[in-house]
Amino acid sequence: MENRYIIVGLAIISVSSLFIIYGVLTNNDRVMGVSLSILVVGVVSTAVGITYREPLGEMLEHYIHDLDLFYSSILEDVGIVGSHKIKLCLEDRVIVFSERIIPCRNISVGVNMINRVPYIALPITNILDYISKVVGESSDVVDGFRKLFVDTSYLCREISLTKENNIISIELSKLSEKALEMMKTPVNVIRVYVLTLLVHHFRNDVEIVDEIVTAESYKIIAKILGE
């Protein structure tokens, strides 16, 4: 059991229920539609919290995969599908999907809005903990990527990394079939792990600048914030 997901799920259910009531009273179909989608996320988050077990060597992809279908639907309902911005906030321990870049301040897990910009935030605390166990406190970021993606998860066979000032480029080459399948989902567990490993190593917030996908490689260009 994971109490954090249960609490978050119940909070989302409560908020979405209020919006559903508002939508019924005002006869606003759009509000009701989005609220029902958010309600589903609350139910799923609560269920995940009740049934959650600490993962052993599976990179938590099952947790992210279970939520992926529901979050992709909400991304569409909220209007931030497609060219949405992605960043990982270290202090709040969340990965954030938003229509425009938003600051890592007062971010709440779930669906919310800040400065009139809608966003979805997913918790990554357990992912950070898992990465800490796998890569340790290595001073070599490339070695950390190799331990996680090559030696532990077998998602690729080659890693290349370049860094100029606060811009860093990571390319995973000779991807496995499992990696290619993971990349097809909106949440994209590989993207989550790349950003989380960068946050673990640099101890700063990170945001995606660009992503390049080919038949056998996946490159993420990211900005290390606060350097």
Image (spheres, rainbow, N blue to C red):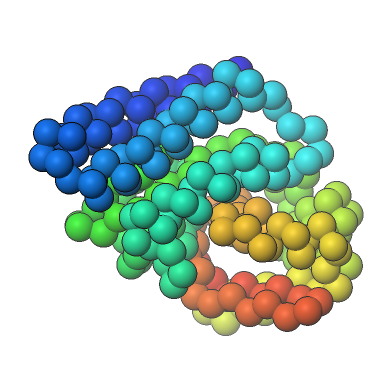
* Residue at the far left in the pictured view: 26
Q: Quadrant of residue 143?
A: bottom right
Residue drawn 71% across the image and 73% down it: 218
Residue 85 spot, x, y in % from top left: 42, 66
Residue drawn at (24%, 34%) of the image: 20
- Left or right: 212 as drawn, with respect to 56: left
Using the rendered image of the protein, determine whether residue 225 is visible from the camera's viewpoint. no
Count numbered badges in the picture: 0
| x and y percentages locating residue 98 in the rendered image | 37, 60
Report which quarter residue 199 is drawn in.
bottom right
Near-viewer residue (70 or 63):
70
Where's residue 122, x and y in %? 48, 44
Q: Residue at x 81, y 39 (%)?
A: 57
Left or right of 27 on screen, residue 39: right
**Residue 119 visible from this viewpoint:** yes
The foreground one among 196 and 2 is: 2
Q: In which quadrant will I find the N terminus?
A: top right
- Left or right of 23 in this view: 218: right
Q: Is residue 202 above or below residue 54?
A: below
Q: Residue at x 34, y 61 (%)?
A: 79
Residue 118: % across, % down: 30, 55
Q: Please tell me which residue lies in front, 85 or 206.
A: 85
* Residue 122 position (above or below residue 52): below
Q: Is residue 23 left or right of residue 151?
A: left
In terms of image quadrants, where is residue 115?
bottom left
